[in-house]
Protein backbone atom coordinates (compact mmCIF):
# COMPACT_ATOMS: atom_id res chain seq x y z
CA UNK A 1 0.00 0.00 0.00
CA UNK A 2 2.76 2.40 1.01
CA UNK A 3 4.83 1.65 -2.11
CA UNK A 4 1.77 2.24 -4.29
CA UNK A 5 1.23 5.70 -2.75
CA UNK A 6 4.92 6.52 -3.18
CA UNK A 7 4.78 5.61 -6.88
CA UNK A 8 1.65 7.71 -7.33
CA UNK A 9 3.26 10.74 -5.63
CA UNK A 10 6.43 10.34 -7.67
CA UNK A 11 4.41 10.19 -10.93
CA UNK A 12 2.39 13.19 -9.79
CA UNK A 13 5.53 15.15 -8.99
CA UNK A 14 7.03 14.15 -12.35
CA UNK A 15 3.89 15.26 -14.11
CA UNK A 16 3.91 18.56 -12.31
CA UNK A 17 7.58 18.95 -13.13
CA UNK A 18 6.94 18.40 -16.82
CA UNK A 19 4.14 20.97 -16.73
CA UNK A 20 6.23 23.66 -14.94
CA UNK A 21 8.50 26.14 -16.68
CA UNK A 22 12.27 25.80 -16.39
CA UNK A 23 12.31 28.64 -13.83
CA UNK A 24 10.70 26.22 -11.38
CA UNK A 25 14.02 24.36 -11.25
CA UNK A 26 16.27 27.41 -10.94
CA UNK A 27 17.37 26.20 -7.49
CA UNK A 28 18.29 22.49 -7.67
CA UNK A 29 16.36 20.39 -5.17
CA UNK A 30 13.75 23.09 -4.39
CA UNK A 31 10.53 24.28 -6.00
CA UNK A 32 10.87 27.85 -7.25
CA UNK A 33 8.47 30.40 -8.67
CA UNK A 34 8.60 32.05 -12.07
CA UNK A 35 11.24 34.45 -10.76
CA UNK A 36 13.50 31.62 -9.71
CA UNK A 37 12.86 32.23 -6.01
CA UNK A 38 12.34 29.28 -3.69
CA UNK A 39 8.88 28.56 -2.30
CA UNK A 40 9.08 28.87 1.47
CA UNK A 41 7.23 26.48 3.73
CA UNK A 42 4.38 28.09 5.65
CA UNK A 43 4.98 25.66 8.50
CA UNK A 44 8.72 25.92 9.02
CA UNK A 45 10.29 29.36 8.78
CA UNK A 46 13.47 29.40 6.73
CA UNK A 47 12.71 26.08 5.04
CA UNK A 48 11.80 25.73 1.38
CA UNK A 49 9.68 23.19 -0.43
CA UNK A 50 11.93 20.39 -1.56
CA UNK A 51 11.38 18.46 -4.77
CA UNK A 52 11.19 14.64 -4.69
CA UNK A 53 14.70 14.66 -6.16
CA UNK A 54 16.18 16.75 -3.38
CA UNK A 55 19.51 15.48 -2.03
CA UNK A 56 21.56 16.64 0.88
CA UNK A 57 24.09 18.09 -1.53
CA UNK A 58 21.36 20.49 -2.79
CA UNK A 59 21.05 22.16 0.62
CA UNK A 60 21.85 25.86 0.67
CA UNK A 61 22.05 28.56 3.32
CA UNK A 62 18.75 30.14 2.28
CA UNK A 63 16.62 27.02 2.61
CA UNK A 64 18.45 24.62 4.91
CA UNK A 65 20.99 26.65 6.85
CA UNK A 66 21.22 24.00 9.57
CA UNK A 67 22.69 21.58 7.02
CA UNK A 68 25.48 23.95 6.03
CA UNK A 69 29.04 23.14 7.20
CA UNK A 70 29.79 24.81 10.50
CA UNK A 71 32.51 27.49 10.32
CA UNK A 72 35.83 26.48 11.79
CA UNK A 73 36.61 28.11 15.13
CA UNK A 74 38.88 31.11 14.84
CA UNK A 75 42.16 30.58 16.63
CA UNK A 76 42.78 33.11 19.37
CA UNK A 77 45.97 35.10 18.97
CA UNK A 78 48.82 34.03 21.18
CA UNK A 79 49.40 36.25 24.21
CA UNK A 80 52.07 38.87 23.82
CA UNK A 81 55.44 37.49 24.90
CA UNK A 82 56.91 38.80 28.09
CA UNK A 83 59.91 41.14 27.69
CA UNK A 84 62.91 38.96 26.92
CA UNK A 85 65.55 41.37 28.13
CA UNK A 86 66.25 44.26 30.47
CA UNK A 87 68.73 47.10 30.14
CA UNK A 88 70.43 48.98 32.96
CA UNK A 89 72.59 52.01 32.29
CA UNK A 90 75.17 52.86 34.93
CA UNK A 91 75.33 56.62 34.60
CA UNK A 92 72.58 58.11 36.76
CA UNK A 93 72.40 59.03 40.42
CA UNK A 94 71.08 56.22 42.64
CA UNK A 95 72.35 55.90 46.20
CA UNK A 96 75.34 57.97 45.17
CA UNK A 97 77.03 58.66 41.86
CA UNK A 98 76.38 55.87 39.36
CA UNK A 99 78.68 57.15 36.64
CA UNK A 100 82.41 56.53 36.49
CA UNK A 101 84.88 59.05 37.80
CA UNK A 102 87.00 60.94 35.30
CA UNK A 103 89.66 58.60 33.86
CA UNK A 104 88.53 55.84 36.26
CA UNK A 105 86.94 52.43 35.92
CA UNK A 106 86.18 51.50 39.54
CA UNK A 107 82.55 50.74 40.39
CA UNK A 108 80.81 53.26 42.62
CA UNK A 109 78.21 52.44 45.31
CA UNK A 110 75.54 53.91 43.08
CA UNK A 111 76.46 51.58 40.19
CA UNK A 112 76.48 48.56 42.49
CA UNK A 113 73.02 49.51 43.78
CA UNK A 114 71.67 49.64 40.22
CA UNK A 115 73.23 46.28 39.33
CA UNK A 116 71.80 44.67 42.46
CA UNK A 117 68.32 45.94 41.58
CA UNK A 118 68.62 44.63 38.01
CA UNK A 119 69.81 41.14 39.01
CA UNK A 120 67.55 40.75 42.03
CA UNK A 121 65.64 37.48 41.86
CA UNK A 122 67.42 36.31 38.69
CA UNK A 123 69.14 32.95 38.54
CA UNK A 124 71.75 31.71 36.12
CA UNK A 125 69.12 29.48 34.48
CA UNK A 126 66.94 32.56 33.78
CA UNK A 127 69.68 34.35 31.85
CA UNK A 128 70.69 33.60 28.28
CA UNK A 129 73.56 36.08 28.17
CA UNK A 130 74.72 39.46 29.42
CA UNK A 131 76.19 42.15 27.18
CA UNK A 132 78.27 44.89 28.82
CA UNK A 133 79.29 47.96 26.80
CA UNK A 134 81.72 50.53 28.17
CA UNK A 135 81.68 54.24 27.23
CA UNK A 136 83.81 57.30 27.94
CA UNK A 137 83.51 61.04 27.53
CA UNK A 138 85.19 62.83 24.60
CA UNK A 139 88.21 64.09 26.51
CA UNK A 140 91.42 62.36 25.39
CA UNK A 141 92.41 60.39 22.30
CA UNK A 142 90.11 57.86 20.68
CA UNK A 143 92.65 55.06 21.15
CA UNK A 144 92.95 55.76 24.87
CA UNK A 145 89.19 56.06 25.35
CA UNK A 146 88.54 52.78 23.60
CA UNK A 147 90.86 51.05 26.07
CA UNK A 148 89.27 52.90 29.01
CA UNK A 149 85.77 51.92 27.86
CA UNK A 150 86.87 48.27 27.70
CA UNK A 151 88.30 48.42 31.23
CA UNK A 152 84.98 49.76 32.49
CA UNK A 153 83.13 46.93 30.76
CA UNK A 154 85.56 44.38 32.20
CA UNK A 155 85.08 45.75 35.71
CA UNK A 156 81.30 45.47 35.50
CA UNK A 157 81.47 42.01 33.91
CA UNK A 158 83.75 40.72 36.66
CA UNK A 159 81.43 42.07 39.34
CA UNK A 160 78.42 40.39 37.72
CA UNK A 161 80.28 37.09 37.53
CA UNK A 162 81.50 37.08 41.14
CA UNK A 163 78.44 38.56 42.85
CA UNK A 164 75.48 37.17 40.86
CA UNK A 165 76.82 33.75 39.83
CA UNK A 166 76.68 34.38 36.08
CA UNK A 167 79.47 32.38 34.38
CA UNK A 168 82.02 34.26 32.30
CA UNK A 169 81.04 32.41 29.12
CA UNK A 170 77.63 34.07 29.29
CA UNK A 171 79.06 37.59 29.56
CA UNK A 172 80.21 39.55 26.52
CA UNK A 173 82.04 42.87 26.71
CA UNK A 174 82.92 45.60 24.26
CA UNK A 175 83.96 49.26 24.21
CA UNK A 176 82.32 52.08 22.30
CA UNK A 177 84.66 54.76 23.65
CA UNK A 178 83.16 58.26 23.28
CA UNK A 179 80.49 57.14 20.80
CA UNK A 180 76.79 57.89 21.28
CA UNK A 181 77.14 60.57 23.98
CA UNK A 182 74.22 61.04 26.36
CA UNK A 183 74.97 64.73 26.85
CA UNK A 184 76.78 67.32 24.75
CA UNK A 185 78.70 70.00 26.59
CA UNK A 186 80.22 73.15 25.08
CA UNK A 187 83.93 73.87 25.18
CA UNK A 188 87.15 72.06 24.34
CA UNK A 189 89.35 73.18 27.23
CA UNK A 190 89.49 70.58 29.98
CA UNK A 191 88.04 72.26 33.06
CA UNK A 192 86.33 70.91 36.20
CA UNK A 193 83.05 72.27 34.82
CA UNK A 194 83.46 70.39 31.53
CA UNK A 195 84.45 67.17 33.32
CA UNK A 196 81.37 67.43 35.54
CA UNK A 197 79.10 68.19 32.57
CA UNK A 198 80.33 65.14 30.65
CA UNK A 199 79.90 62.77 33.62
CA UNK A 200 76.76 60.96 32.28
CA UNK A 201 78.78 59.89 29.21
CA UNK A 202 81.19 57.94 31.43
CA UNK A 203 78.99 54.88 31.72
CA UNK A 204 78.38 51.23 31.01
CA UNK A 205 75.23 49.74 29.53
CA UNK A 206 74.28 46.25 30.69
CA UNK A 207 71.80 44.25 28.62
CA UNK A 208 70.46 41.10 30.27
CA UNK A 209 68.90 38.71 27.76
CA UNK A 210 66.51 36.24 29.35
CA UNK A 211 65.81 32.64 28.43
CA UNK A 212 62.42 32.75 26.67
CA UNK A 213 60.16 30.11 28.15
CA UNK A 214 57.37 28.75 25.97
CA UNK A 215 53.88 28.99 27.42
CA UNK A 216 52.28 25.57 27.90
CA UNK A 217 48.54 25.51 27.02
CA UNK A 218 46.29 24.74 29.99
CA UNK A 219 44.93 21.69 28.17
CA UNK A 220 48.42 20.17 28.10
CA UNK A 221 49.48 20.93 31.65
CA UNK A 222 47.85 17.86 33.18
CA UNK A 223 49.76 14.80 32.06
CA UNK A 224 48.75 11.16 32.33
Image: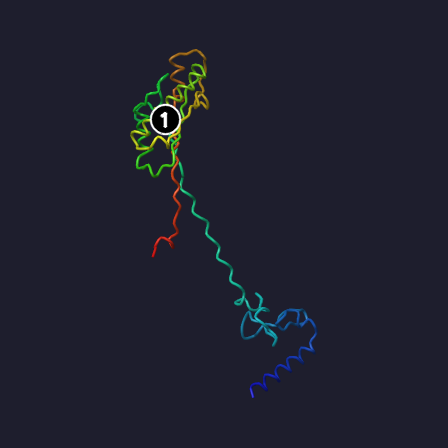
Provide residue 32's location: percent of width, then percent of height. Answer: 64, 72
Position of the C terminus by quadrant: bottom left
Residue indicated by mark 1: 90
Say which of 15 and 42 sits in front.
15
Say which of 56 and 19 sits in front.
56
The answer to which quarter of the image holds residue 150 is top left
Residue lying farthest front? 169
Residue 124 falls left or right of residue 25: left
The answer to which quarter of the image holds residue 183 is top left
Residue 10 falls left or right of residue 114: right
Position of the N terminus by quadrant: bottom right
Provide residue 163's location: percent of width, then percent of height. Answer: 29, 30
The answer to which quarter of the image holds residue 81 is top left
Task: Report the colour scheme.
Answer: rainbow
Provide residue 35's location: percent of width, then percent of height. Answer: 67, 69
Residue name at image x 35 percent, y 53 percent: 221
Q: Residues within 10 Å of mark 1 (few under 14, many from 20)?
A: many
Q: Relative to 191, does residue 164 appear above or below in the rendering?
A: below
Say which of 88 and 194 sits in front.
88
Residue name at image x 67 percent, y 77 percent: 17
Mark 1 lies on a secondary structure that is strand
Say which of 33 and 139 sits in front.
139
Provide residue 56's location: percent of width, then percent of height. Answer: 57, 70
Amino acid sequence: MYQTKTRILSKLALGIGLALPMSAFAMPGYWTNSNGQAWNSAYAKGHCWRTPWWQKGDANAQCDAYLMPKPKPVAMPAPAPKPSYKIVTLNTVASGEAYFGFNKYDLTPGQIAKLSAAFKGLKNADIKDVKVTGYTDRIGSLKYNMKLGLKRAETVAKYIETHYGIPADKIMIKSMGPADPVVNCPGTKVTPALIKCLAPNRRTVVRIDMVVKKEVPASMQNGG
